[in-house]
Image (cartoon, rainbow, N blue to C red):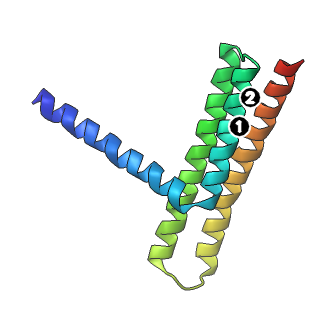
């Protein structure tokens, strides 16, 4: 019974990783987020960021990636519901994209301020 539970949990990780792979392979903005994440993490290593800074950088990266994944899920769901132009669907997509923009800008500010402070 316990092994069955563990196998199912491990299986759910497989679905999650498949979703992340799909996100990275199908979404141009995810590639931009990936490049930015790698660049910031390399800068943090070079600048020998302390643990507290790593916590902020990781949290910001996770927030951006989560927002991008949810935005993509909303877009796919909306396109599945109706492929035709629809004002409400358009608003839903715009709101989801706006959420990604807010999170990405906040992450860029936090990351930029942290890295600048570490470079001094």
- For residue 53, the mark is none
Q: Quadrant of residue 62?
A: top right
C-alpha distance separating marks 2 and 1: 6 Å
* Image x and y of residue 59, in percent: 62, 31
> Which structural element holds mark 1?
helix
Furthest-top residue in view?
Answer: 50
Residues packed near mark 1 inside 10 Å, few (<14), some (14 to 19) or many (20 plus): few
Q: Where 75 falls versus 12 (above or below)?
A: below
The answer to the question of whether label 2 and label 1 lie on touching residues, with beta carbons closer than 8 A, is: yes
Position of the C terminus by quadrant: top right
Q: Residue at the left extreme?
A: 1
- Tag 2's secondary structure? helix
Give 51 or 80, whichever is nearer the viewer.
51
User: In this figure, what is the number of numbered marks?
Assistant: 2
Q: Residues within 10 Å of mark 2 (few under 14, many from 20)?
A: some
Along the line of sight, the residue nearer the viewer: 20 or 102: 20
The residue shown at (73%, 38%) is 107
Residue 26 in the image: state x and y as whole percent. Answer: 53, 62
Residue 20 or residue 88, whichever sits in front: 20
Q: Which residue is mark 2?
A: 43
Residue extending farthest bottom: 84
61, above or below 102, in the image: above
The N terminus: image quadrant: top left
Residue 113, percent from left and from top: 83, 29
Q: Residue at x 45, y 74 (%)?
A: 80
**Badge number at residue 39:** 1
């Amino acid at each position: 019974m316990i092994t069955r539970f563990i196998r199912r949990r491990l299986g759910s990780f497989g679905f999650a990783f498949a979703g992340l792979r799909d996100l990275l392979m199908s979404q141009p903005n995810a590639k931009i987020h990936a490049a930015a994440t790698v660049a910031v993490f390399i800068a943090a290593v070079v600048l020998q960021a302390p643990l507290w800074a790593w916590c902020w950088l990781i949290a910001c990266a996770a927030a951006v990636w989560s927002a991008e994944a949810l935005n993509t899920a909303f877009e796919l769901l909306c396109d599945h519901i109706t492929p035709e132009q629809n004002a409400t669907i358009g608003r839903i997509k715009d709101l989801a994209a706006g959420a990604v923009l807010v999170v990405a800008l906040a992450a860029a500010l936090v990351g930029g301020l942290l890295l600048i402070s570490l470079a001094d």
